[in-house]
Image (cartoon, helix red, strand yellow):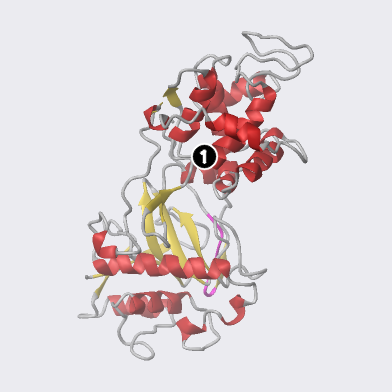
Amino acid sequence: MKTISIIIFVLIFVCSGSFPVMAMSGPQKALFRDGIDWFDINSGTSSCYLGSGGNVTSLTGSDAGQKVWNYFAGQGLSTPLILGIMSNLYEQDARFDPEQVEIPPGGDSSTPSGPAWGIAQWTPGTSIEGYAKANNITTPLNSLLTQLNLIWAQMKNETPPGYKNFIGAYQNISNPVQAAQFFFTNFEGGGAGGSPTAALINELELYNTNNGSSVSSNNGSSGCSAPLVNCASPSSANSSLSSTRQNVICIAQQQEKLWSSEPDSYRNTGYYDYSLGNPEPWCADFASWVYKQAGYPFSGGRDGWDIPAVSGIETMAQTPNSGFTWHPANSNYQPVPGDLAIYSTAHVNILISISGSTYTFIGGDQGPSYNGNYGGTDSGSTVNSIIGVPGIQTGSAPLAGWVSPNN
């Protein structure tokens, strides 16, 4: 996939209020997530957003069905997800013929024509041709390779019925029947139906020859690299980060996972553990608590560790022997995961990962999250993830600087 430089902003409800920035579109979210590694809090093993694979340049398999299976296996999909896709394509044409034309009129064609065409029965015309061009798919439209790349691009961005970031939701399904129904409804645009029988599932599974890893992608393997942080055993991670930074990242992620699973009412008092029971804006409390749990507490705060004001964290970092260092935004400092980002509008959050020029943060008392809103209508009163490009003026909220642990 062609590398595209984009600047992404999200709306953040900060501790002292809010500042206006641009919301991301569905395609922008997909572009950001493309190739990003995530961490599995439960198992400690690396996982990644399905979608890190790019346009495949060759197919493997003895027949069309096996090539389809290997294609999606090579993009990282599990067996139930592959069965969900293939059962729908099978209903279009059991041969997985890229030149299949809808019946009636039926028959094959080397060019898009008729009311619907190809393995996914697209409506032919300039729209699908333009979509292929926009996604750097230059092989002939009537080839199986092209059409599989088209399906994958639409799953990552927007499906024909208009479902954005289809793969983001699809990857959470573990049952092939449910996967088939989801694909039928949100990719095919159908209603009830599309569920494969047990016999069809058994038939399609015969295409699985474990050759999925042999597909070739123009942006490298779709598999994920070693985790930056192993949250089950940070000391064993393949990482140059200090144990303090690894612990900070894992604890922040664990808290985000907790908040996403709690009822809406949790936002009313769930932050009291961070703020020592005080009802107050709590992004600085959250940062203080995470660092305390990581074994590297702030100094000079309430109970010796809790600094409730964002400005207080900045001041602490500029105090000799505090264990932290202050890096103004206009310096040449290159931030590192585990750092704290301080914003001039009195907000702070934790840098979790960097991918190119795009940064992922977890913070308290901010929202909405790019990966799903929770915490009720007051989406600011949650712990969640946001993404952005710090250091760039975003309305009234420029980055003031970074606070980094010396250890």
Q: Is residue 191 in view from this perspective?
A: yes
Residue 144 or residue 370, whichever sits in front: 144
Identify the residue at horizontal 77%, vertical 39% (top origin). 191
* Three-letter amino acid code at the position of disc 1: Thr
Quick one: label 1, few (<14), some, or many (20+) residues within 10 Å?
A: some
Q: Secondary structure at mark 1?
A: helix
The C terminus: image quadrant: bottom left
Q: Quadrant of residue 235?
A: bottom left
Say above or below: 230 vs 264: above
Q: Which residue is mark 1?
A: 79
Outermost residue, bottom side: 303
Question: Magenta stretch?
Answer: 10-16
- Does residue 188 show up magenta in the picture? no
Position of residue 17 measured from the top left corner of the image (x, y, whole percent)? 57, 72
Identify the residue at horizontal 64%, vertical 19% (top origin). 118
Identify the residue at horizontal 43%, vertical 54% (top origin). 392
Identify the residue at horizontal 25%, vertical 67% (top origin). 243
Residue 312 or residue 174, whichever sits in front: 174
Position of residue 7 measured from the top left corner of the image (x, y, whole percent)? 47, 46
The N terminus: image quadrant: top left
